Amino acid sequence: MKKKLSLILLFILSVLLISEWIYPFAELTELSTASWIILFITLSLASFFTHLRYYWTIPLHIVMIYVVAGIYYAKDGIFSGQWFSSFFQITFSGFSDMVQFRPSDISMDFIVIVFLIALWLLSYITTYSILRKQRIMSVLILTVSYLAVINTFTDYNSSWAIVRTVLEGFLLLHLALTSRIATPNRLNGNSLKRNGIIYHAFILFLLAVFVFSSLMLPKKAPIWPDPVPVIRDALGINTTRTVGYSEDDTELGGAVKKDNATVFKARTDNGHYWRVESKRIYTGVGWANEKSTELQQFSSGDNFPIQLSEETAGEAKTAEISFEASSEYVPYPYGTQAINSAVDTFNANLTTEKITPTNTIKNYTIELKTPVYNIETMQKADFSTLPDSFVSKYTQTPSELPKRVATLANKITKDADSIYDKTKAIESYLSASGEFTYSTDDAKETPNGADYVDQFLFETKIGYCDNFSTSMVVMLRTLGIPTRWAKGYTPGEGEKDAKGDKATYTITNNNAHSWPEVFFPGTGWVPFEPTATFSNPENFQEPTTETANKPDTPNESSSEASKPDTTEKTPEQDTGSSSTGEAPQKKSTKTNTSTSSFNIPLWIWWVPVGLVTVLLTLAVICRRRIRSNLLLRSLNNKPSFSAAYNKILNLLASYKYKRQPSETLRQFANRIDSHLQIDILSKLTKIYEAEIYGQTTKERQITNQEAEYIEKLILILRKKNS
């Protein structure tokens, strides 16, 4: 009876110990609940504690991983055929990304699957350590180290988790030691049996004394300087970043290095904000991702699906964009009407308002009209017509936002007569009051527990566009004014054409920028420029009777472009899901990594991945076969011939057949064919050269004969290098 009771206590403590791995993971990855993963490890430990054979435990764990992952990510239920196929596709794609060292492509659902596999292994190790070896110290040290790393390098506070872990670990150690001492061969086993109750009670008393003392007694301040900054610098975590566009805005702050590398060039009539996306959810340390997104596909030449301004004026103009290297996103100016490009299909993320091509893009032309920003119209805008859901969405602030931020906003705007005037008052306070200094070198990181905006407004007063724009958004929101955060690029440096009608602007990484957008009924989303030393490239019409009567005349002034969202103004179109604004589309908030969420440093994901290193090693050893299998598999989907040819070159490089800098493609193909005693690569190269130097601009699908050539080449490579 005592043995069964001891086993039950060991099982319960093991569940509690491994649960400490789950709580931070669930919070950092924004899982809806940790309960299902806790149930997973409970069943996993139970299978090992009851000594089920491997031919039962392995299928059981695979089924449990399938079910638990489905509970979190299967939209149509875990028993649907769609989730069945999606599960294996997610797993295969995820392991392929791991093998090819592409961590940024790993999806969140695959990370959860890997974490469940890691917990499976951890459950086995824990059970083996307790029941076979009667030792638990290795698992305890591993758990404490995991929590310490999470506590140090993320915003998750694991202080109490470490206390619980130490208590659970000591109790496990005590029970494991007791079972070892109580074995028949031990000399002091009989003594323990006689005084068992006293022994256990004394241990529990000592633990209670130690915990109470550690919590209640005064603690001496650290003697040594904080090593975390040195460790962060060594690991490349939160160190000085390079300026430029990034999708990750979940943790703002800190210095940035300048980068003069050209991103793209724009030939247009005048400078514009080059908008990439917008965000809505401010977390106190940065801008979080929306939990849901909506995509709309459109073709080259179609009406632009994102309408920022409710009114435009004048004839359509054009802007010709040329990237230095192929891009995965499409910057666009306010007033965009259509995008024309050789890339035929685009995706508009109606939540983040980010435009992405189906593949990549290098050149495209934008048709645009001048947005109308009539100051008098904005001063008379009736904000009472906006739905409550829309206003609450774009006036969101963290509950922990210090009250003095709102107090300062009210003080600055106390003499303003209209919402437009309040907006301009805060813009002027940040950009022209002399209170704040623009600097990319001296900007400070946000301390733990501090608010990014509060620190900038009242403590450092030094920063760059992110500090200024975020501060203006948050201050306006405390006044109940619907505002959001936009990012992209400033106009760049322009050189006039010989004719003088247009100029070519060079946009570098240094032109990466962020600014606030305020929604005015009747006008749309309007950009403002609070960053000191910067000016707004968009035109505003001064409040005169003449301009008020002629809203279709071009404008002049200096503030910012806006985004009209007529659809967002009606309650039916404002679904309240996740958006940072835009009417016809849906609301948008760019996403960086969390909603109160929170971006996890990339290397954190390798903690669970480290527990499946054996699989990685096998995958690396078989990387050539995996790459060739992926290529063979892709041929069934009829890719473009040029894409398949480039994959062949990459596969040859993995077999050490690398093209020399001095070699032409044809010379390289002849050398490889001579070495392999074939003529396949030469044939493929002739077809490739004929295609890229031909007159056609549209890529064609690979033919069956070309696919057979590639399959034959792969088989020869495998045979030659087996």
Image (cartoon, rainbow, N blue to C red):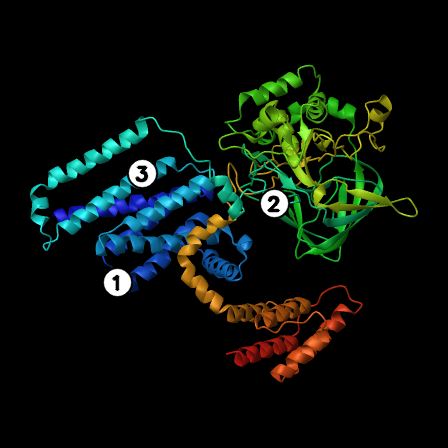
Q: How many marks?
A: 3
- Residue at the limit of the structure toward the front, as seen here: 223
Measuring from the top left, give residue 681's x and y in whole percent. Answer: 66, 78
Identify which amino acid the numbered label 2 is placed on: Glu
- Location of residue 542 (image quadrant): top right
- Compared to residue 315, the image places residue 98 above or below, namely below
Can you see residue 160? yes
Identify which amino acid the numbered label 3 is placed on: Arg
Disc nearest the viewer among 1 and 3: 3
Callout 1–callout 2 Cβ contact below 8 Å: no
Callout 1–callout 3 Cβ contact below 8 Å: no
Residue under label 2, please give it. 247
Q: How many residues crowd mark 2 within 10 Å: few (<14), some (14–19), many (20+)?
A: few
Towards the viewer: 353 or 326:
326
Residue under label 3, please give it. 164
Residue under label 1, please give it. 53
Measuring from the top left, give residue 328's x and y in whole percent. Answer: 66, 52
The earlier-in-sequence mark between 1 and 2 is 1
Measuring from the top left, give residue 39's x and y in whole percent. Answer: 33, 47
**Mark 1, secondary structure of its residue:** loop
> What number is the disc on residue 163?
none
Identify which amino acid the numbered label 1 is placed on: Arg
**Mark 3, secondary structure of its residue:** helix
